[in-house]
Every structure is written in structure tokens, then in C-alpha cells.
Amino acid sequence: MELLLLLTLPVAGAALLGLIGADRRAPEVNALLSLGTFLAACALTVRVIRHGDLLLGQEQFFIDPFNVFLVTLTAFVGLTTALFSRPYMRVELEHGRLTPGRLRLYHSMYQLFMFTMLLALTTNNMGLMWVAMEGATLSTVLLVTLYRTPGSLEAGWKYFILCGVGIAQALFGTILLYVAAGKVLGAQGMTALLWTHLDAVKTQLEPTVLALAFVFLLIGYGTKVGLVPLHSWLPDAHAEGPTPISAVLSGLLLNVALYAVVRSKVLVEGSLHSQLPSMMLMGFGLLSVVLASLLLWRQRDIKRLFAYSSIEHMGIATFAFGMGGAIANFAALLHMTVHSLTKSSIFFTAGHAAQKTGTQAMERIRGLITLSPTVGWGLMLGSLAILGVPPFGVFTSEFLILTTAMRTQPWAAPILLAALAVAFAAIFSKVQPMVFGETTGRRLAHPPALLPVFAHLAIVLLLGLYIPPYLAEWYRAAAHLIGGP
Amino acid sequence: MTHLPLYQQLLDTCAALLLLLSFAMLSQRRVVTLVNLYAVQGAVLAAATLLLAWRTGEGHLYLSAALTLALKVAFLPWLLHRLIRRLEVYWDTEPLLNVSGTMLVGLVIVVFAFALAQPITLLASTATRSAVGIAVSVVLLAFLMMITRRKAMSQVIGFLSMENGVFFGAMSASYGMPMVVELGVALDVLVAVLVLGVFFFQIRERFESLDLHHLEALKEHD
């Protein structure tokens, strides 16, 4: 029931917003729908806490601790982003960057995007997961090009082609999985793509084919995670699209893609009895962290800067999943959560800063603290949080990941630490003048409403100081599920 | 030499035709012909599916063949032809690598693909498992086509041809995917082409051309 509501609300919402479209109240309707989805997600969570794992709809849907927390997170950030986008997109409309027709497209696609992500998370069918992931790309391509500037068209094209090709590889990987499973579960079995069934027989699956399948799946979904060297769509799409879309792409889509990778890894590792999947995840993760932190120095556009920071953080989480084991998995899940919350709040403030100063070029954004203390403090605190300054939650997860790396993968720990230091210096040296630099601009009369930003940061702070027991229990259950050496 | 049953020979012919068509697409610069080749590829795919359906008696394969016929032979080519007429993009410019060079790379790719398909071939219990290598080749050749082309339209046809290859792989390795997945994939492909149609008009409106060199401004700053 909760699940039905969770999935039908966004679809119905997309249709409704497509119909009422240019109506003045569309942003409110959008926010209300997101609220409904969030409530459904909460209800689902409560049910999973009470009754344990759920298998629904003829086993097509499967809810366990690993995906239920991502569902709640997705619905929550979806809600706050909808709240944020309400005034933000109105201003964009007033500035003439958008037409009412495009705003209608925006709202409708926003709900559809939410639907595809929730479907990808809740489905038990690896094939349907693929369909939903491709749907997530398709529903956001036209959002990236919403402003129709040359830059945004280029970004949209790159996004479409790279993710399209990537996802085609993932489809091939899924087919290989199906072939291998068909051998064990019966060739024509409808069950051969259901994750729970695959998980049950994973030790009997043919290792060579599964290794091949994993390579294809990792390249396919890894493109969407933004792993280096498959990342080149990511900064463009984040920088050129409207800010709320940057926030959900970075905060949610990357998580969902990583979720798909981890689900595949669990199966393959069970079959392979080798280090291959772990080594590949660690390798790609570390490469992403290192390269992204170096590229951070060369950024001039505020949204590109934080897009590269997303690549870096996804790299950290991927690396941690690669290490595996209870602590690293726990830390990776926590990292996904806090990164998602922090990064979306940073995009909110960066969007406001760009809107107020009329530019995304960092050299021309100065003295935000004078222009608007809320935006200035929001950006500063958000940046500190994402850089892993204690007591924010990112510190906790990065600390856990680093200490585990020192213990189990000593070769990687210095590299990771150096990359984190480089990233710290790069981001801090760029954000500091933007917030505290000299400005000739005058203080804004009306401070922007940044409730979502501070709500997110407060949660991240809370997670750094104290993880509620039921949440920790969740993470632990999920970490156990993912397993690893 | 072992004697193969007739349906097996027919299937192998289909597979060979698919590979041949991939090479034809790789060398073709006329966009209209490219779309036609894509339609023929779809038709061969549908024929192979139908043959398998008849052979195995699987109901869902008939459906899948009908879907292929409707979507990949009729609707998508029609849509692409319409787009080409409306946007007036008839020729691709000289590819990044000349035709003979591309062909040579293509040959190497086919050898590589067969090596890659070896473990899958051993595992698959289907009658068509020898075709898996060809499916992988079609995917990789389409990939090559996307890399070497400059016009958006040719890249899209490369993308669609890649999907055909993946589909053929599913067919030959495991008699297709479960119906719900196949429907979902078909829906995604359909939506992808529709989105692209909209997208092309946006690019056109902005740049007056569909040449992708306009879309190379977003580079890292030095």
C-alpha cells in the first residue's frame, strides 16, 4: 500500500503537472506531491522497521534496510528541493531565463525523475532497475537543457550520449547475469532476474560470465555514478542545468547509480570468491578521488567546482564499498547520506549566490557575507561540512573510511589522505574569498528563505555528533547485507 | 563437416547479415541510407526472433518479434526520416577516421568480440549460442561508429544499432529477456528517440546546424 502510493504519486503528479502546467500554483502542487511521496516513504520505513524485509507485487519489489534508507533519503531531498525550487524558479521566470511552458516541462519531469529513482531503488528485478535508470537519464536530459543556452545544449547532448552508451553496457551486463542465472534457476524462469533469487543462488553462478557481467555493469552504472574516467558528462550537466536539478542529480541520482553498482557487486562477489569486484571498485574509487581533487584547482565556475567535489565524494564511497567489511560499508552508507544532504544544500546556496550576483564565475562572486549573511553562512558552513571538518557527519564517515583503509589497505591510505588534503585546500581557497571578500554590492533587502539548506546542515551536524540507534541499526543491517571481506 | 538443420542455417544467416549490416553502417555517410540500413537490421532481427519463436514455441518471442517489427522497422525509421527531412541533414561530414581505417579497426574488434564471447558461448544452452560473438561484435562496432562520427544524427543511429546488438545478444544467449523487461527497454528506446527529436530542434534553433563541433565549448579551463 505504502509502496503503491510511493510510486503512483510521482507518476500521477507528473501527469497532473503536465496538465495544469503553466498555472501559478504549479510550484506549490509540486511541493505538495513531494511531501506526499515523502510521507509514503516514511510509512514504508516504519513498516520495514516493524516487520522486516518486504517482498511485494509478485516478488517484483523488494524492500530491505539497504534500499529503504535510500528511499527515505531520496524522498526527503526530493521534498526539500521542491521547496527550494518554488521561489528559486519563480525568480528565474521573472529574470526571463524561462518561459511558463518550460516551467511546466520542468515540474512534470521533476516528478517523473523522482518516480524513476524510486522505482530503481525499490524494484527487485535487475532488468526493471535498468529500465528505471535509463528513464532517469531520459527524464533529466530536457531539464539540463532547460535554459536552451549553447552550453546547456552541449551539456545535455553529452549527458544523453555518454549515459546512453554507458547504460547500454549495463543492459548487456544484465543480460549476462540473466544467462548465468538461467543455467541455475531454469532458462525460461521469470525469476532469473529477481535479485532475491539471484542472491540465494549466487554461489552457484558461473564465475567467468559473472565477472564479465560485472565489468559491463560497473562501466554502465559507473558512468552514472560519475567515476573517473567516465565522468565527463557530470560537471557539464551540473553546471548548465537549473540549480534544483544540479542538487537532485548530485544528491540523489549518483546515489541511486551507486546503489545499482553495489547490488551487482553483492551478487558477483558471492559467485567469484575472488578480489576482482573489490579491487575494481577500489581502483575506480581511488582514481576518482585523486583526479577530481586535482581538477578542483582548475575550476572557475562555482557549480562546476562542487560537481567535481561530487565526483570526489562518490569516489570515496565507491572505494569504501570496495574495501567491504562491516565498518567500511557502514561508513560508505553514512557517507552517501551526508554527502547527499550536504551537497544538495551547497547547490541551493550556490544557486542563490549565482542568482543574486548574476554570474556563476567564482572570481565575480565576492563578499556574500555582506550581500546576504544567510547565503554567505550557508555556503561557508556547507563547504566546511563537505570538506570533512568536525563535527559534521562527513568527518565521521571519512574518518571511519580512512582508519579502515589504514588497517586493511595500507597502500591506499596515504593517497586518500593526500587527495582529501588537496581537495580541502582547493575548495577552501575558492570559497573563502567568495564569502568574505571585498564587495561593492549592497546588502539585499530581503534575505532569501534558506530553510532547506539549514535543515540539511543541521541533520548532517546531528549525524556527526550522534547517530540515532535505529538509524545505526539500519546501516549495520545494510552493511551486513553488502558484506565483503 | 557436421550437417546443420535448416533453421540453424537460417539463424546463422541472419547473424551473418547483422554483422554485414553493421559494417555497412560503419562505412555509410549518407544519413538517409543509414536509417534504411537500421531498418533492415531491425527486420533481420525480427526475422531471427520469429524463427526462434517458431522453433522453441515460446509465446513471448512472437510478441517480441512483433514489437521489433513495429518499433524498429516501422516507427523509428519513419520518425528518423521525418526528422531528417525537417532538419535537412542528408550527409555526414568526413568521419574522424577514414573509411578503410575504420574498417580495419572494425575487423580487429570482431576478433576481440569473439574472444570476449567465449565464456558466454560455453555457458549458454541455447541452439543459437554461436551467435553471441556476433552480438558482441554488433555492439562494439556500433560503439566505434559513435566514436568516429561527427553528426548528431549518425551518433544516434549508432546508439540504436548498439541497442539492436544487445537485444540480439539476449536473444541468442537466453531466448530473450522476461517480457516485462523487454517492454520496458522498448519503451525506453522509444522515449529516447522522442526526446532526441525535441533535442535536435533545440540544437538547430540555437546553432542552425546539427554538426557536433558547435558542442565543444565546455572544456576545462587552463
Image: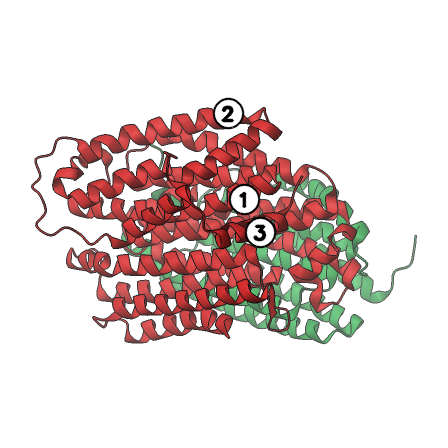
User: What residue sits right under mark 2 in the picture?
Assistant: A415
Disc 2: host chain = A
As drawn, the label of residue A478 is 3
Disc 1: host chain = A
- Quadrant showing the C terminus of chain A: top right
Specify whether residue A244 is in view: yes
User: Which chain is green in the rendering?
Assistant: B
Residue at image position (15%, 55%) is A95
Please state which amino acid type lies under the numbered disc 1. Phe
Image location (x, y in percent) of residue A406: 56, 27
Residue at image position (51%, 49%) is A472
Image location (x, y in percent) of residue A66: 55, 54
Task: Please tell me if label 2 and label 3 are on a single chain.
Answer: yes
User: What residue sits right under mark 1 in the picture?
Assistant: A330
Disc 3: host chain = A
Residue at image position (70%, 58%) is A198
Q: CA distance from mark 3 to mark 1?
A: 8 Å
Return the residue nearer the eye: B11 or A247. A247
